């Protein structure tokens, strides 16, 4: 989520960022969903022995930090291996 609207316009100046493949509605709200293709993740995993995947999600009550190669569950539900940071 981009907190300031001018940041959305600045993305047009960077050759590494593109917006033409994002739906218009989330762009209007300055919200982008990003992902890493499985092929890139596999390459990094096989090429760099110490590489880690770190994923974050949040709810109204906590931030969840997942380290490892398994994806987060829907709804930001923690497992025993996750770090949960309470927001209260």
Image (cartoon, grey):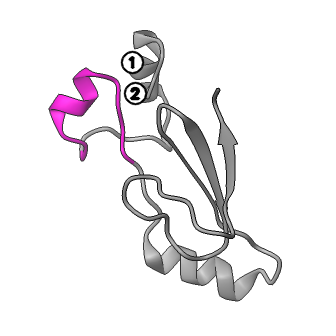
Q: Are marks 2 and 1 in contact (CB under 8 Å)?
A: yes
Q: Which mark is residue 59?
A: none
Q: Quadrant of residue 78?
A: bottom right
Q: Position of residue 21 (x, y in %)?
A: 24, 47
Give residue 45's quadrant in the image.
Answer: bottom right
Which residues lie in the magenta part? 21-33
Residue drawn at (23%, 22%), measured in percent from left and top?
28
At label 1, counting other C-alpha atoms closer than 10 Å, the crowd grade (few under 14, some 14-19, many 20 or more) is few
Magenta highlight: main SS: loop
Instruction: Label 2: state its secondary structure.
Output: helix
Q: Is residue 75 left or right of residue 55?
A: left
Residue 50 percent across, percent down from the top left: 83, 77
Disc on res. 12? 2
Seen in the image, is 2 located left or right of residue 53?
left
Tell me the residue that label 1 is attached to.
9
At 63% from the left edge and 30% from the top edge, which residue is drawn? 87
Residue extending farthest bottom: 46
Compared with 39, 46 (above or below) is below
Relative vertical location of residue 82 with respect to residue 64 in this rendering, above or below: below
Q: CA distance from mark 2 to mark 1?
A: 6 Å
Residue 28: within the magenta?
Answer: yes
- Give coordinates of residue 43: x percent, y percent: 60, 82
């Amino acid at each position: 989520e981009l907190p300031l609207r001018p940041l959305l316009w600045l993305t047009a100046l960077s050759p590494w960022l593109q917006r033409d493949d994002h739906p218009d509605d989330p762009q209007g709200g300055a919200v982008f969903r990003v992902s890493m293709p499985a092929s890139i993740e596999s390459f990094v995993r096989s090429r760099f022995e110490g590489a880690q995947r770190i994923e974050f999600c949040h709810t109204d009550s906590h931030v969840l930090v997942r380290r490892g190669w398994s994806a987060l569950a829907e709804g930001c539900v923690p497992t025993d291996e996750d770090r949960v940071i309470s927001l209260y």
